[in-house]
Each structure stands twice: as structure tokens, then as C-alpha cells.
Amino acid sequence: MRITRDLPSDATAARRARRIIEDSLAGREDLDDLVIIGSELAANASVHGDPPYALTIEVTTAVRLELSNRIRPAGPEVPRIASPAKAESEVGGLGGRGLQIVARLSRDWGWDRQDDSLVVWAEVG
């Protein structure tokens, strides 16, 4: 199974990603982890990239979540895990942990550049 859904170009992108994952993968034991991963990927895309945003779910022997967004004109920012000190220095200590969470909950994650888009992915299972 492979599905791709567009996400809104506003602060509701992460919420919409959660709902798509819940509806598409209901009944899986790892659903909570997948929902958190998808939400973090969508939130990161809306902060660091430009629309359009799209979520792809691919189920084979594993589940792969992909979040694509347009690269900002200033150039691509390579997705990387923030150091704990940087994460603590973010607004109220609440930011900078998204990819730490993705890395912890997934068996692998990474990113690919496709023309003017960036695709950040994570695999579970």
C-alpha cells in the first residue's frame, strides 16, 4: 500500500498528518509511534520548508513515512538532529527535539532532495 495526501499550508499540518496516519494505519501495534513521527515530520516541514507539503505512507514489511516540502529559496537546510544544548535554548526549551524523537522511535530515518523538494523519511517495523 502506498498513499500520498496533501497537507495544509498552515499550523494544522501536523494535526492533519496525525489524522491521516490514524485513519490509514488503524489497528497497528506501533500506531502511536507512527502518529508521533508523522506529526514531528509535518511540524518540521512547516517550520523549515515551504508549501506544498505532502505525506506519503508506504507499507511493505515496514512502514515508511515521508514528508515532502519545497526547499526555501535561500537554499536547502540539511535536516539534522539538534544538540541537547540547542534544543534547550529554543523558545522555552520546547523546540529542537523533533528529529531526536523521530530517530528514537524509528529504525532508520533520513532525507533526500528531489528537484526543488526535500523529502524527510522515517521507517518503523
Image (cartoon, grey):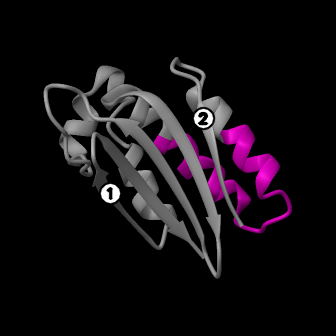
Q: Main secondary structure of the magenta part?
A: helix
Residue at image x 70%, y 49%? 21
Q: Estimate the x, y position of residue 10 in percent, counting from the top left.
A: 52, 17
Q: Of helix, strand and loop, which one carries label 2?
A: strand
Q: CA distance from mark 2 to mark 1?
A: 19 Å
Q: Is residue 31 above or below residue 125?
A: above
Residue at image x 19%, y 40%? 77
Quarter of the view holding residue 73:
top left
Residue located beneath label 2 in the image: 6
- Whether 88 is among the magenta residues is no
Residue at image x 34%, y 21%? 92
Q: Is residue 26 above or below residue 106?
A: above
Residue located beneath label 1 in the image: 111
Read off the magenta span.
18-41
Is 42 situated left or right of 71 in this image?
right
Is 11 situated left or right of 81 in this image?
right
Compare residues 86 and 39 and report the one nearer the observer. Answer: 39
Where does the C terminus fall, quadrant-wise?
A: bottom right
Q: Amino acid at mark 2?
A: Asp
- Whether 29 is among the magenta residues is yes
Q: Of helix, strand and loop, which one carries label 1?
A: strand
Is 115 situated left or right of 38 in this image?
left
Give the mark nearer the N terminus: 2 vs 1. Answer: 2
Q: Amino acid at mark 1?
A: Trp
Compare residues 92 and 61 and report the one nearer the observer. Answer: 61
Quarter of the view holding residue 104:
bottom left
Where does the N terminus fall, quadrant-wise?
A: bottom right
Q: Estimate the x, y position of residue 115 in percent, counting from the top left.
A: 27, 46
Q: Estimate the x, y position of residue 6 in percent, counting from the top left.
A: 60, 35
